[in-house]
Amino acid sequence: MKRSNLPSARRFRMHSQPRWHWRLALLLAALVVCLGALLLLAGAASLLGQPSTPPLIVEPLPLLLGGGLLLCCGVLGWRACRTRLRRRSDISLPKHLLKKSH
């Protein structure tokens, strides 16, 4: 006979929370990656389209540096959000404690 006053295991399990804010952060990171790639391409196109005189090479450098920086930041943000989305939230223990290798 089942006793109803005992606690059930379902109450102790972690409930999955909505992860819409991480998906929104993924979208923002993807937009930053696209913007960085476009700036990088625009800087490269303006650098290749100019004659090889030293004073004119300085103009596309901010586009190249800004595009590269935005591209790197966007990729790092994308990877951080993806790992956060894929992380299981049942038990918060380190991986080496969860699995024993014999």
Image (cartoon, rainbow, N blue to C red):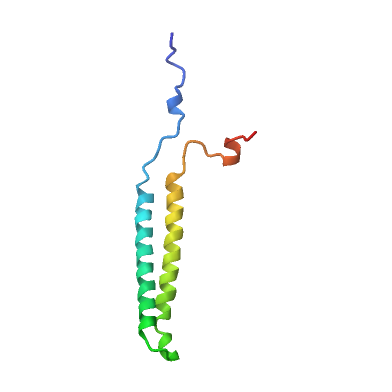
Residue 94 shows in this picture = no
Quadrant of image for the C terminus: top right
In this rendering, the answer to whether 100 lies above or below 3 is: below
In this rendering, the answer to whether 99 lies above or below 26 is: above
Camera-side residue of 11 and 27 = 27
In this rendering, the answer to whether 48 lies above or below 21 is: below
Seen as rendered, the residue at the extreme right is 102
Q: Position of residue 7 (x, y in %)?
A: 46, 21
Please give the name of the residue rendered at 39% of the width and 40% of the height, measured from the top-left corner: 17
Please give the name of the residue rendered at 46% of the width and 43% of the height, measured from the top-left corner: 87
Q: Position of residue 101 (x, y in %)?
A: 62, 35
Seen as rendered, the residue at the extreme top is 1
Q: Quadrant of residue 72?
A: bottom left
Residue 23 shows in this picture = yes
Please give the name of the residue rendered at 34% of the width and 56% of the height, measured from the top-left corner: 27
Quadrant of image for the N terminus: top left
Q: How many marks?
A: 0
Q: Quadrant of residue 56?
A: bottom left
Q: Position of residue 14 (x, y in %)?
A: 45, 34
Camera-side residue of 94 and 55 = 55
Please give the name of the residue rendered at 36% of the width and 42% of the height, measured from the top-left corner: 18
